[in-house]
Image: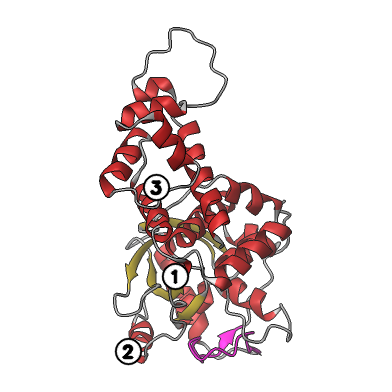
Amino acid sequence: MVDVERKEEIRDFLISRRAKISPEQAGIPNYGELRRVPGLRREEVAQLAGVSADYYTRLERGSLRGVSDAVLEAVASALQLDEAERTHLMDLARTANLPSWRAARRPPQQRVRPGVLRLLDGMTGAVAMVQNGRSDVLAANLLGRALYGPVFESTAAAGPETPSRLPNQARYLFLDPGAGDLYPDWRAIAASTVAMLRSEAGRNPHDRALNELVGELTTRSGLFAALWAGHDVRIHTTGTKRFHHPVVGELSLQFETLHLPGDEGQTLFTFTAEPGSASENALTFLASWAASPPEKTATGGSSAPELRSHARPKTLNPGKTEHD
């Protein structure tokens, strides 16, 4: 992004957060007054943050250069930002305070270290995969490839013109018509994915591949464009995700995330089932199915060496749904 776009990003984020806070939530008496703007006025945020109205107006116009952490914390408190939103505001300020050539961080490492690959292969009872901040799948164990078979097949179906394209969760969610069949909670997952991409854009605004992905999805998916314009952010940590797998049916799995400190930008995701549950039985069957010799092997669409070389059984077509 150029500096003008960065200022627009800061402005739109602060305005969107201000619009979400009502005077009642902020403890400001209303007295039945008819308000012309949603949420708080700039002057009210300035008062809550302990700064002048002119100063806050400058911040909301995208001028975060030279702003102290104490002021940013005061603004975050006034806007009642959650942890992800506070982190995003700090990231926006960090990159605003650096020249473009310094703010442009090195692209995230795409190659997964051999030790991490061996760790993935050793996790036979759990789904395990490594992703970057753009939601590219960099590596997966055998069970991970089986669970996310439709995502890998969608990448393969892109054709030979994109031989080096990695499987990408966001691209699959918004551009593959079968994504709604794999994810019963498709809309919630789609919103979370966009929020995580927005957080990544705050951390690494000069990531060319990320900007290209956002541009592609914005032009090809009206829903993505609408969600992106909302400026919501999220930190992916832990939770439950439901699947409707074409081989084993319904699954409800708990996921955990672990950032790999030796590999900036890479995150290990694991999925496990509750012991004794129907999902555990389904996951066990899926592992057995994935390990059995397939009648026909699908080669996959990426030549990246990080994607495991295990033969992947062919996944059934989950059907078609329209998202936009």
Which of the 4 image quadrants contains residue 128?
bottom left
Q: Position of residue 65 (x, y in %)?
A: 39, 52
- Secondary structure at badge 3 equals helix
Where is mark 1, residue-wise? 283
Where is mark 3, residue-wise? 85
Q: Is residue 302 magenta?
A: yes
Can I make out residue 153 in this image? yes
**Could you tell me what secondary structure mostly forms the magenta stretch?**
loop
Can I make out residue 178 in this image? no
Q: Does residue 134 appear to the left or right of 235 in the view shown?
A: right
How much space separates mark 3 and mark 1, taking CA atoms? Answer: 35 Å
Labelled pair 1, 2 in contact (Cβ < 8 Å) = no
How much space separates mark 1 and mark 2, taking CA atoms? Answer: 25 Å
Q: Position of residue 90 (x, y in %)?
A: 36, 53
Labelled pair 3, 1 in contact (Cβ < 8 Å) = no
Of residue 292 and residue 165, the one placed in the foreground of this image is 165
Residues in magenta, as a range:
296-313
Kind of residue indicated by mark 2:
Gly
Q: Position of residue 101 (x, y in %)?
A: 46, 72
Kind of residue indicated by mark 1:
Leu
Nearer to us: label 3 or label 1: 3
Where is mark 2, residue-wise? 115
Of residue 57 and residue 160, the one placed in the foreground of this image is 57
Q: How is the image coloured?
A: secondary structure
Q: Residues within 10 Å of mark 2 (few under 14, many from 20)?
A: few
Which of the 4 image quadrants contains residue 278?
bottom left
Nearer to us: label 1 or label 2: 2
Nearer to us: label 2 or label 3: 3
How much space separates mark 2 and mark 3, taking CA atoms? Answer: 34 Å
Q: How many marks?
A: 3
